[in-house]
């Protein structure tokens, strides 16, 4: 079973997205802030991380940099999730180390396609 770490501070977004992904057959771990996200990435070693960019304690950009700078977690693909939909926000997320970018509100079919593309990239 594919394991996804969802790093999201908004309870409603977290609950809705985690349930929808579980129904699609993914195992979900949750982190509610950037610090917990970095710690859980190291602890559970998920197959993929969905990273909100606007997080308490440390933001998603810094959390991504920390995950990607650790040799134990550097290869885990990260998809940025953000309500910021400007081109420079995408570039900022990719520059921080995110492998892909998606906007909120989440369109599940589009996000599932990106998740699958990231996971397929790991197999090849």
Image (cartoon, helix red, strand yellow):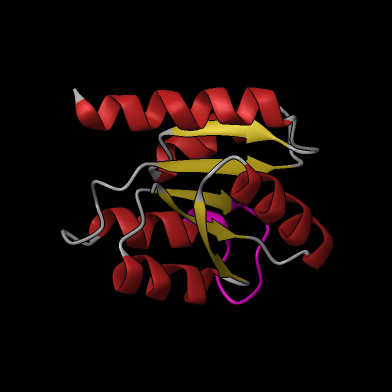
What stretch of residues is rendered in magenta? 52-61
In this rendering, the count of numbered labels is 0
- Is 48 positioned to the left or the right of 7 in the image? left
User: Going 25% across and 32% down the picture, which residue do you hit?
Assistant: 122
User: Going 40% across and 34% down the picture, which residue do you hit?
Assistant: 99
Q: Give above or below for 66 relative to 51.
A: below
- Is 45 positioned to the left or the right of 95 in the image? left
In this orientation, which residue lies closer to the viewer: 117 or 39?
117
User: Going 35% across and 62% down the picture, which residue do you hit?
Assistant: 66
Position of residue 59 measured from the top left corner of the image (x, y, whole percent):
58, 63
In this orientation, which residue lies closer to the viewer: 69 or 25?
25
Residue 81 counted in the magenta span: no
Q: Give above or below for 93 relative to 52.
A: above
In this orientation, which residue lies closer to the viewer: 32 or 89?
32
Question: Most prominent secondary structure in the magenta stretch?
Answer: loop
Position of residue 30 measured from the top left corner of the image (x, y, whole percent):
57, 67
In this orientation, which residue lies closer to the viewer: 40 or 65?
40
- Is 84 positioned to the left or the right of 80 in the image? right
Position of residue 79 measured from the top left corner of the image (x, y, whole percent):
50, 40
User: Going 59% across and 40% down the picture, which residue do you hit?
Assistant: 24
Q: Give above or below for 44 relative to 121.
A: below
Q: Give above or below for 117 relative to 36.
A: above
Position of residue 77 measured from the top left corner of the image (x, y, whole percent):
36, 42
Q: Quadrant of the C terminus?
A: top left
Residue 56 counted in the magenta span: yes
């Amino acid at each position: 079973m594919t394991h996804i770490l969802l790093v999201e501070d908004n309870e409603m977004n977290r609950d809705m997205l985690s349930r929808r992904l579980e129904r699609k057959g993914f195992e979900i771990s949750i982190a509610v802030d950037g610090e917990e996200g970095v710690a859980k990435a190291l602890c559970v070693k998920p197959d993929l991380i969905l990273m909100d960019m606007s997080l308490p304690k440390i933001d998603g950009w810094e959390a991504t940099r920390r995950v990607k700078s650790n040799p134990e977690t550097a290869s885990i693909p990260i998809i940025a999730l953000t309500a910021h939909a400007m081109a420079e926000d995408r570039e900022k997320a990719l520059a921080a180390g995110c492998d892909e970018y998606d906007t909120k509100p989440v369109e599940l079919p589009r996000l599932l396609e990106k998740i699958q593309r990231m996971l397929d990239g790991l197999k090849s």
